[in-house]
Amino acid sequence: MFCCLYVPDFAVQAALRLEPEDKRHILKQSAVAILEGPAALPRVMATNERARLMGVETGMTRMQVETCGRVLIRKRAWANEYAAQSALVDCGFSFSPRVESTAPGMVVLDLEGTEKLFGPAQSAAQQIAQRALEFGLEVHVA
């Protein structure tokens, strides 16, 4: 049985997971846009759901984002995304020795034969989601 861990809004979660824990909870409730590109004209490359509801779209400039209201703007940091992907892989290794990093914010693991350790699929999925939270990531498990 294969299991897929997917981190929605991966770049946003990667940017926020390294914030101090007391600030992180508040920031997760905020509209967040991640910008990348030349310093003179960075553009939105990722947002969270709250920012999208405020009208922020991929490709917008910083100035356009600022007209949408109170949106927290962060610059893309590849190191944060690499660290978040590594944490996601480590989370997968907590449940299986067979883990594959398939895309940014996505990991597939083989749970074949782990039923005695983690119970049925639904129980394993809940345990995996809880473990991912300990790594600072909210995941969808399928």
Image (cartoon, rainbow, N blue to C red):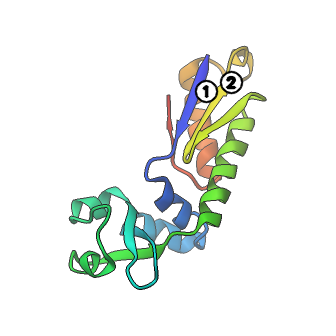
Q: Position of residue 36 (x, y in %)?
A: 46, 71
Residue on which disc 1 sits: 124
Residue type at mark 1: give it: Ala
As helix, strand or loop, the secondary structure at mark 2 comes to helix
Disc number for residue 118: 2
* x 55%, y 36%: residue: 5
Identity of the residue drawn at 64% across and 46% down: 88
Q: Residue at x 21, y 64 (%)?
A: 55
Q: Pick the quarter of the image with the N terminus.
A: top right
Label number found at residue 61: none
For residue 7, above or below residue 81: above
Q: Amino acid at mark 2?
A: Phe
Where residue 4 sits: x, y (%)?
55, 31
Neighbor class of circle 1 (other Cα within 10 Å; few <14, some 14-19, many 20+) is: some
Query: In this view of the protein, which residue sits in the foreground, 93 or 80?
Result: 80
* Residue contact between numbered discs 2 and 1, judged by CB atoms under 8 Å: yes
Q: Label 2, label 1: how many angstroms apart (C-alpha)?
A: 5 Å
Query: Residue extending furthest bottom?
Result: 40
Other residues around mark 2 within 10 Å, as few (<14) / some (14–19) / many (≥20)? some
Question: In the structure shown, which secondary structural element does the residue marked by tag 1 occupy?
Answer: helix
Q: Picture coordinates of residue 34 (x, y %)? A: 43, 68
Q: Earlier in the sequence, mark 2 or mark 1?
A: 2
